[in-house]
Structures are given as C-alpha cells and as structure tokens.
Amino acid sequence: MTTTQFVPEKDPSATLGAKRKVMSGGISVGPATHLAEERSRLGELTWSHFEVTQVGSTLGAEISGIDLTTDINDAVISELQLALDNYKVIFFRDQPLTSDQHVAFAKRFGDLEIHPFIPSNTGVPELVRFEKTAEVAGYENSWHHDVTWREAPSMGAILHGIELPPVGGDTLFSDMGAAYDGLPDEIKAQIDGLTAEHDFMKSFGHTVPEDRKAETREMFPIVQHPVVITHERTGRKLLYVNRNFVNRILGVSDEESTALLSYLCDQAATVEYQIRFHWQPHSIAFWDNRAVQHYASSDYWPQRRVMERASIVGSRPR
C-alpha cells in the first residue's frame, strides 16, 4: 500500500492570523502584537546629549557617548531620566566608577536607600554589595521588583558590574507595562482596584534573629500596594506583584488569591516582554523599579561575581 505524505502549501501559521492563541496544555503562542506601537514609538525617539541603541521591543537601551565618571551637567541628567522613563532600563559600558562616583551619580536622581537586610560596601553604606562565590551562591534568580515590602519602594536602581564570571551571570529584565497590556480584558477588569499584601519576611525573614523579629516587624510592617499601579511620570499602567514579597491578594478567597497571583506573576516570564543583559567589567544597568522586574541568572557557580547597587528612594505606588 502506497501512502502520500500531506504537505501543506502554506505555513501552518497562515490560518491562525496575527493573534496570540492559547494552545492545548494552556501554552500561549503567536505574535505579541500589542508591542508594536511601543516598539515603533521608541524607535523614533532622538536624543541630544548621547547616542542610544534600542535593545528590546519595548524596553532597554544602550547609551554611549557619555562618561559617568565625570561631573555631568543637569541637562544631561534630565535627559537620562527621560531615557529611563521611556526605555525602562538603560545600560552603559566601560564606566569604571569608584564607589564614591557610583553614589554621587545615583544621588543626582534622588535620595538613596540603606538596605536593612543585605550587607553593604563596608566603606559606603548606600551601596549594597552582592559578592557571590563558591561559598555564597546566587539566590536572586526569580522575577521581582526590589523592596516592594517598603511603604515607598525604590524608584530605580543602578547596578555596577565589578567582577564578572567568564561565562554566565546575565541579568534579565521584563516590561510590566507590556505584561499588563497583554492581559485579557476580563483579567484587567478582575484585578482593577485589587490590592496585594507585601512582606519582607518571605525573602529575608530567615536572616532576622528570633529575638529581633518583633522589633524588625515594627520597623517594616506588612504593606499594601495596588496590583496594578500607574507610573507617576509616564502615566503607564503596570502590573505590580511578584512572588518574592507578595503574601496574597486581598478581597478574594485564599484559593482565588493563589491562582490569580500565580497567573499574574507568570507574565514576567513571557520572553517577548524581556531583554537579557550580558555583563562585562564596569558595565552599568539603571532600571526603573516600577516599570520592570528583573532576574539575576544564577548559572555561574562556583565562579565569582561581584556587583554593587545603589537604590533611589521612590514614592508610594498608586
């Protein structure tokens, strides 16, 4: 018996249209068409004080033609803030900042935080130091916004790559505006006005001695932030929940909270919303902590990776 293999004349996608589909097993495939407008808008931006290379569809830009070790004037700082607002995360190469220069640059954008649970550079308390070795492994490999357990979480953070492994140790960023825009309308309606409970204990509770827990809880009580916030400078709606610090979504049953939180947090893992930054010595990443979540790839053990971060105080999310 002779059989003839069926060979279609068209690409299998030709019958599906330019719409994202949920396939068997609940997997979403297809074009993220809602990114097109923002991608085009970013591609048309022009800048006066530096050159910009767009990195991702809706986030990320590498900035060149500027030396962060020098005394930068106010006009350049203002334009860098505008670039951050638009690209959500901006990158610089070959910027051998000293600790003092790192802090001085970060202070041009606002007051700086002192992190209560992560060791600092011993000489500069405003710099959180991530020094990973064979003995101290990396545990930052989950999607998160920083310090959402604060009443006023960070506006942004500036991370300096000091010592990097030969391979690995990249940082990924995911656009939470794109994540919100990509939600089905019925989910947007469901989460509009909902509030989530944020708590430092989920990630840092194990570092607090038992006899200091009550005191630390009084200093950093559980806080509530909207599930969807509005960016104070751009007006953009942003998804604002993460597994590291959110206990639950309020106003719904425990079962609904667990399912909804899992679904919403999974949006950061959508590759089309992401960029991946490969570090080199003295690279700088400056991200908007409201607009993006980030993920530090922990694929370099037992190699050494040393980074320092200055975080800029923000306002309460609305």
Image (tube, grey):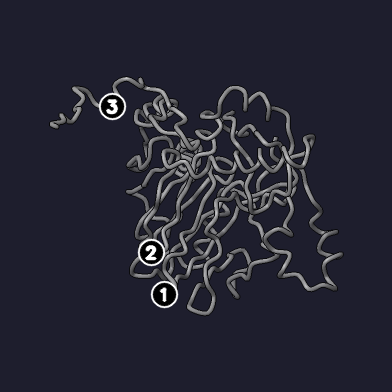
Residue 55 in picture, x, y percent from top left:
35, 42
Among the two numbered marks 3 and 1 on one chain, the one whose residue lies closer to the N terminus: 3
Question: Which kind of residue does numbered mark 1 sit on?
Answer: Gln
Q: Secondary structure at mark 3?
A: helix
Please state, as top left, top right, bottom left or bottom right, where the C terminus lies in the image: top right
5 or 244, nearer to the observer: 5
Among the two numbered marks 1 and 2 on one chain, the one whose residue lies closer to the N terminus: 2
Q: Which mark is residue 12?
A: 3
Residue 146 in picture, x, y percent from top left:
61, 52
Residue 23 in picture, x, y percent from top left:
44, 32
Question: Local crowd at mark 2 within 10 Å, few (<14), some, or many (≥20)?
Answer: some
Which residue is labeled 1 in the image?
A: 303
Q: Which mark is residue 168?
A: 2
Q: Which mark is residue 187?
A: none
Q: Secondary structure at mark 2?
A: loop
Is 183 displayed left or right of 254 in the figure? left
314 or 55, nearer to the observer: 55
Please determine whether, in this image, residue 215 is positioned above or below residue 176: below
Among the two numbered marks 2 and 3 on one chain, the one whose residue lies closer to the N terminus: 3
Please determine whether, in this image, residue 282 is positioned above or below residue 64: below
172 or 93, nearer to the observer: 172
The residue depicted at 35 percent of the width and 62 percent of the height is: 280
Question: Badges 1 and 2: C-beta atoms under 8 Å apart?
Answer: yes
